[in-house]
Amino acid sequence: MSFVEKSGKNTWRVRYWKDDGTHGSIPGFATKKAAENKANEIDSERRHGTFLDPNAGRLLLADWATTWLDSLDVEQATESQYTSLIRNHILPRWGTTSLSDITGSAVHGWSKKLRAKGYAHSTVTTIVKILSMMLADATHERLIPANPIRPQRRGKRRRAHRREALWAAPDQVLKIALQAAVAAWPGAGTLMITAAYTGARWGELAGLQRFNTHLDDGCIVIDPDIGALHEVDGALTLGPPKTEDSARTISLPPFLIEMLRAHLDTHCHSHVFVTKDNELLRRSNFSRRAMRPTTDGTLHKPRARHHLQPIVPGLVFHGFRHSHKTWLIADGIPQVAQARRLGHVIPDKIEHIYSHVAPEIETRLLQALQQRWTTALTTLLDQRSSHDAAATTVEIGLNALPAVEAA
């Protein structure tokens, strides 16, 4: 039961029991009657389960963030992303603010300033989403009456422009790989070609091990338990691939089988793809040393060690996966075969369960990939007779990447 007591010469306050067994206090009532009315209101709300401790909302967001992060049960990479965005963006602005003092208009104004500073729309959206999740859980814990962040209905309409994913044609993939063999190391070029002709993700190839590479059977296996290399806060660990359907067997076209045989003879590491120093791959290092110079070119850098032609400026490693998907569509490969190969979920649950890839479809798929490789290689060999800088780089790349000769 709540009760009232005199707190000053002409003021009263209400005392009530808190969930932790201590007393809470609401001061500032000018008459005893007003205080009693508030006490009766609190008791009524308790009986109906609608009472909110007015002092709970005074909890600072920084303190709630610690509790909230400790309660998360998400993938390690997701938790690392949340922690980083909270530490670098949310706490500097809202850490010393009480939960009850955070308003929707203030949050929307803050997000507008973040975009004005040059942060990507997707980044700002993610930051606000995390803050909204924190406040939604605070509402569930009855610390505040409601989540103050609501969709903004006023103001100019903002259209997020979806950037079309870049992809590369087979001859462009080959040129990029040959430049990587020159500028980085031969294994980098083999990795790029494997990505483009299997559609496998970065983590799946970086985590691929010899015992899951069955070249006599013409396939590689993405293991459901250790089929991907994960990098979280600088630490590299083997774990499951992105989704349950990502655990799969990927068949290889004939040329790629021979290319991987030659590649595996160049080192003795347990992983198929490693750095030139026989260490596990890191995405950022590979992007800096291999992807960016070989796709963007280095002609704009006077001090670059290698003068490389721009092939597909802006292409990222995931673009090889987009390229593979694009090729399969162009070759008329059925949707189910595309989904199985790429590790995608077929939206229709019934179709997902009962759809299978017939052997003749798999054969046609591999023949199409083999033909793409043959055409790209033949075209490139015909072009290397010229004496320009691009042809010279191609010639050097062909010599640096013995796996191409094996294929």
Image: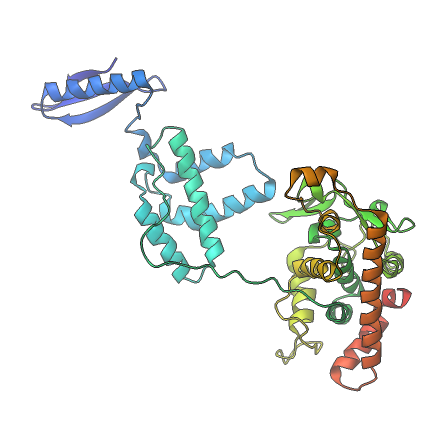
Rendering coords of residue 367 (x, y %): 85, 59
Residue placed furthest toward the bottom? 387
Residue placed furthest toward the right? 216
The type of colouring in the image is rainbow
Does residue 144 lie above or below 193 as drawn? above
Residue 56: name its quadrant.
top left
Given residues 161 and 220, the one toward you in this image is 161
Rendering coords of residue 23 (x, y %): 28, 19
Rendering coords of residue 95 (x, y %): 38, 43
Total marks in image: 0
Rendering coords of residue 278 (x, y %): 79, 56
Residue 240 visible at all = no
Residue at (67, 76) in percent of width and height: 304
Residue 109 visible at all = yes
Residue at (63, 81) in percent of width and height: 302
Q: Give the position of the C terminus as an image quadrant.
A: bottom right
Residue 2: name its quadrant.
top left
Does residue 214 lie above or below 134 as drawn? below
Q: Give the position of the N terminus as an image quadrant.
A: top left
Given residues 155 and 294, the one toward you in this image is 155
Residue placed furthest toward the top? 1
Residue at (70, 42) in percent of width and height: 245
